[in-house]
Image: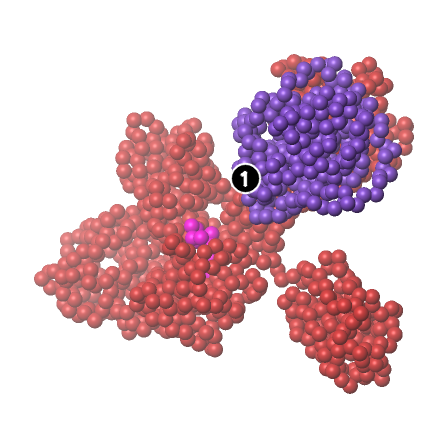
Amino acid sequence: MKTNFHKLLKYIPLGLLSVMLLSCERKFDDLTPATAPVNPDVFIDGFSAGLNYASFGGAVPTAFDVDSEVTYDNSSASMRFEVPDAGDPRGAYAGGAYFTESPRDLSGYDALTFWAKATKAANIDVVGFGNDMGASAYQVTINGLAVNTNWKKYIIPIPDASKLKAERGMFFYSEGPEDEKGYTFWIDELKFEKLGTLAHAEFTILNGENKSETAFVGVAKPIDGLTAIFNLPTGINQAVNLTPAYFNFKTSNEAIAKVDESGVVTVVSGPGVAQITAQVGNVAAKGQLSVQSAGEFAQAPIPQNDPTKVISIFSDAYTNVPVNYYNGYWAPYQTTLSADFEVNGDHILQYTNFNFVGIEFSAPTVNATAMTGLHLDVFVPNAMAGNAEFKIELVNQGADGSGAYTTSIPASQAQQWISLDIPFASFAGLAGRDKLMQIIFSNGDGNMPVFYADNIFFYGDSTPPPPGDEPTTAAPAPTANAADVIAIYSDAYSVLAGTDLNPNWGQATVVSEVQIQGNNTLKYAGLNYQGIALAGSENFSTMTTLHLDFWTANSSALNVYLISTGPVETAYALTVPTSGWASVDIPLSSFSPVDLTDVIQLKFDGGGDIYLDNIYFSKAGTPNPTEPSAPAPTPTANSADVIAVYSDAYSVLPGTDLNPNWGQATVVTEVQIQGNNTLKLAGLNYQGIALNGGQDFTSMTSVHLDFWTANSTALNVFLISTGPVETPYTLTVPTSGWSSIDIPLTAFSPVDLADVIQFKFDGDGDIYLDNIYFSKESGPAPTEPQTAAPTPTVNAADVIAIYSDAYTVVAGTDLNPNWGQTTVTTQTQIEGNNTYKMTGLNYQGIQFGSSQNVSGMTYLHIDFWTANSTTFQIFLISTGPVETPYDLTVPTSGWGSVDIPLSAFSPVNLSDAIQFKFVGDGTVYVDNLYFGK
Amino acid sequence: MKMKKYNIIKSLGFFAALLLMVNFFGCKTDDVQKLDERNWKLVWSDDFDGQAGTLPDVNKWDYDLGTGDGGWGNQELQSYTKNTQNVSLDGEGNLVITAVRSGNTFSSARIKTQGLFAQKYGRFEARLISPYGPGIWPAFWMLGENIETAGWPQCGEIDIMEMRGQEPNVVHGTIHGPGYSGGNPITKSYTLLGDRFDKEYHIYAIEWDENKIDFFVDDYLYQRIERGDVPGEWVYNQPFFILLNVAVGGNYVGFPVPETPFPQKMIVDYVKVYREQ
C-alpha cells in the first residue's frame, strides 16, 4: 500500500462522517431487492443491487459521478472520476469505496474486470476490491495502474476466490494529482468474472526468501513480504497486493511457535525449531521462516544505577536521550544488520552479520563530563568458535576524536549476559567527552557474528555503587575433593591456620573481607601490591595446581606470585578485567623455580579493585561423587525422528567405533548405571567416536547428548565431516546431575551435514555420556493416522470381508450393535479411505450381516492403529456364543497389519462366525477386516 | 512459419488478406468431426525418458544453432544453443526447451529430426505444455526433407502447432508451400474459451495423407486442408522431418515486453509418429 493510502485509512472515520453530512452516499435499493447473494455486477450501466458508495476522508467528496456521455461501447452510463488539482480546497485527491450492505458470494469468479480510459496517460495510485469500510480482510489492490486515452480492459485477479463467500467490498480507488495536475478517468463494465485465462499464480511470504530467526518465548512478529503475481490473459505478469487473510499459514511445530490467521508468529516454548510456511488456495507460497526458539529469554540484569546519574542511550530502565539511529548501515564495508526485538516489554538490540556497527546520538551530542564510564550488557546467543575481541569506540565530536576499548568475550560465556562497566579512562585516546556522538562496536575475528545489546548508558559515580563494582554472585563453589586440597582462603574447605591475609609490606592496597551472597570474599581495593603470608614454610609438592577465583571490573593488570624462601618468586598473569567470576587452576609448574617444598607467601600485584575467593592448592584426585547415581534420563524423541549413535533407547547406527585410536590418553569404558549402558571417558584429553563412513544427517535438526561430570572444567563436543571439517560446541561443566542438551546442527556450521564421519570430545576430567543421537523436530505425536491403512492386495476371490474399501463386504453388517458398551464408534476418512474408529474403547462388537462360514479361510486380517491404547484384543465369536480373544500389540507405530491364523480362535465354530468383539482401551483405528486364505 | 526468405511488408493490406484467408478456410470446420476410422501403427516416438539435465537422444534429434540468416528469416531475437540450460530432459519424462533472457539477448533451442527421421503421410503428434508471454513463439512443425535441394517454400512446411505468447489461449495450424508462404500461408486458429494452453498438457496433431492434412487439438479436428484448397502446388507428397523450438521475438509474434516473464519453458511429454496400416 502506498503512503497515500495509509493516510486515507487513518482518516476513514472522518470520511464516513463526511459521507453522512455531505450525502455522497448513494443507495439504489429501490432498483432491485438487495438480496442477490451471487451477483457479479458492480457497475454496468448504473449501480448494481445493494451497492453503496462512500468517499474517503480528505478526498473530494464529489469526485465520483455517473456519466452518460463518455461510456464504453456506447453503453448508457459509466463511472467518472475527477481527480483534483493539487491544492484544491475540496480535497487532496479522489478516492472512495463501493461496498454492499449485505455480502455477496464471489467464490465462483477469478477476477474483477473493468474498462477504463482517461483524459491523459496516468497511473492510478490504487484500484482494488475487498475494502468493506470495516475490517477489509480480503483486500486486493493494484498500485499505479497505467491508463491512457483509449478504452482498455483491466483485470484484478482474485488470489483465492474460495475465501470470498461473503464479501462486501466490491471496488475502491484512490488517485491524487499527477504532477500536481488533476484529470478525469472513466471506468465502465465493472464486474467480477470467471475468466479461466489467468495462470501461473505465484505467492511469496518474506519476499520468497527462506529466513531463519532466533527468538524467545513471548516474541510475536508478523510474517511480511506477502506478494502475489498472476499471468494475465495477455501473457504478461501482474503483481497485486493482498492481505494476509488470503494466506493459510502453517507451523511445523505448534508446540514451539504458533502462527495466527494474520500471519503473526508467536513463540510459545523452546528450545526448538518451527518452520512457518503458507499457501494460498492450493499453491504453496515461496519462502519460509525457520523460527529457532532459544526458549525463555534471559533478561539482562536490570541496572540499579541512580537515574539522576545516568545518561541512557538504550535501556528500558531509563529515559533515553534522542538517538539518530542504532544502526547506521555505514556503506560500503559494514555488513551488520539489525534484528531488534521485544520480549515482554523489554527491548533488545540485535546485531547480525556483525563486523562493525555504529550508534549515533549527535542531535544533540551528549555531554558526559559528569559521568565516569560506559555500561553495556552484551549477549552472544550462539555457541562461539573462540573468544571474540570486542572493540568499543566512543566518538567525541571535534578535535578530541575518539577512544577505543577492547575486551575479550570468552567463548565460555556465550549464551549469557555479560555486563561491562568501562571507565572512560579505559578508552585509549579519548581526550574529551563533552560532545559524545557515537558508540561503535566492532569485531574482527568473526567469533561473535550475532549479539544482543541492552542497557547502554553512561554512568556517573553513584551510591549505591553500580553493579559491576562488586560481584553480585558468590564465587562458584569449588568441586575438588577436600582430601585433595590444601586451602589458604575459602569457605568451602578448612584453611591453613595462622595465615596473615594482610601482612604490612608497605602496600597501598586496602584489604577487607566482604560477604557476597553470604560468602566471605577477600577484597583488594586500589591494589598496587598485596601479600598473603603463610604461618610458616609449607610443602605443596604433592599438589599440582593453585586454584583462584577472582573478579574485577576495573583492573587492567593482575599477577599472582608464589614465593619460597630466598625469596624466590614467580609471577603468573591473570586475565583482567573479568566478566563475572573467573576461575583458574594454575599448574604449580608455572611457578618454577619456586621451591614447592618450602612455600612461604603468595603475592598479588597490578591495579584496580580485586575480589578473591577459594585460594587453594589441589591435586587431581578422585572426584566426588565419582559417577552418576542414576542413569541418563530416558529420551522422549519419537524413534522415527531419531538417528542414534549411542543409546539403549533407540537402535543405533551399525558399525560405530566408540574408541578409535587417535593417540588419545582418554580411557574409554562402557559402564552400567542401574542397568543402563553409559559411555565413560576417564581422564579425557580428547576422544573420538568414528561413524561407519559418511552419514547424512541433513534431515535432522539437532544432536542430543546426555552428559555427566563432577570434575571436568572444560568440555567440547565436535561434529566432523570429511576434510576434516570440524566445529566445537562448548558444554557447560561440571554438571550437577545429568545435563541434557539438544544442540541445533546449525551450531556446527560449516560441517557438511550430508557427510558426517566422526564425533570428537575434548576437555578434561571424567565424563559420562549417553543418548547421543540426532533428531528432527516432529510435531506432537499424531493422534490419528496420517496415512490410510495399506490397501490389501489379496485377490477378492480369496476373501470374505467384513470391513474394507477394497472388497465387497458382508451385507447388513452392524458396525455398532448396542451391547451396552461406552465405546464411541465412528467411521472416519483417512486420505479418503473409510476407517473404523473406536474412541474411549472399553469393548465393542461388530455384528455380521449373516452367519459366515469361514472354515475355508486360513486367517483373519486386521489393520489397526493406535497412539494411546495399552491393551487391545479382537475376539471371533460363533453362535453359543463361543468366543476366543487374540492379543494385538499396541500402541502401534504406524499401521499394524496382522494375519491371525484362524486356528488361534479355536474352539470358535468357523462354519458359523457371527461377530467380532474388541476389548481394550484408548482410541483405536481399524481397517480391512477380512478373512482370507 | 519460419523459413521466409523475404521481408514481410507490414501493411494493413497484408493483414487484411491474411484475415480473409483465415475466414475463408475457417468456414469448413464444424461439420467434419465424423472421421474415418484409422488403424494407426506407432513407428517412431520419443518419450524423453532419461536423466535430468541431459540432452535428448542423439539418435533422434539434431540441432539448429545460432541466429540463422536474418533471425531465421523472421528477425527472431534468440540464439539457438544446445546448452542444457536451453534444452534438456527433466528426468520426469519430459523434454524442456527453455528461452532465457540475459540482459537484452535471448537464448533458446530448436531441435529437429532432419537426417535422422522423416516420413511421408501418417499421424504426427506431440503432447506438451506451451510457454507464454508477449514475444514468445513456440512451435511443433515439419519441413520437407528435400529442403536442401529444393529450397523453401518449395519443400513445403507444416506447422502443427504455433502460438503467440500474448495469446496463450490461441493455437495456429498452418501450411506454407510455393505460392502460399510467409505472410500468405493457409492457416487457421483454434481458441480455448475460458482456459489457456500453458496451464497443462495438450495434444497437438496432424493426420496427413496424399490428399489432405487434418489439424487437431486434443483430438478435436479444427482444420482440414485438402489438395484443392491450396492456390499453388501441393508439395506434401514426400517425407517431412520434425522440429520443436521456442523462438523469441520476430515478425510473427512481435517483441517481448518488460513484463514478459522469463525464463519460458516448453515442456514436451512425447512426440509420436504413426503410419496407417
At a point 57% along the width and 54% down the height, the residue shown is A256
At a point 75% along the width and 20% down the height, the residue shown is B18
The amino acid type, in three-letter code, at marker 1 is Thr
From the viewer's perspective, is residue A789 above or below residue A194? Answer: below
Q: How many marks?
A: 1
| Residue B65, percent from left and from top | 55, 31
Give the structural element (helix, strand or loop) at label 1.
loop
* Residue B109, picture quadrant: top right
- In the rendered view, does A386 fall on the left or right side of A739? left
Q: Is residue A746 magenta?
A: yes
Residue tagged 1: B84
Q: Nearer the viewer, residue B228 or A346?
A: B228
Hue used for the chain lettered B: purple
User: Label 1 neighbourhood size at 10 Å, few (<14), some (14-19), many (20+)?
Assistant: some
Quadrant location of the N terminus of chain A?
top right
Q: Which of A263 and A805 is in front in this view?
A: A805
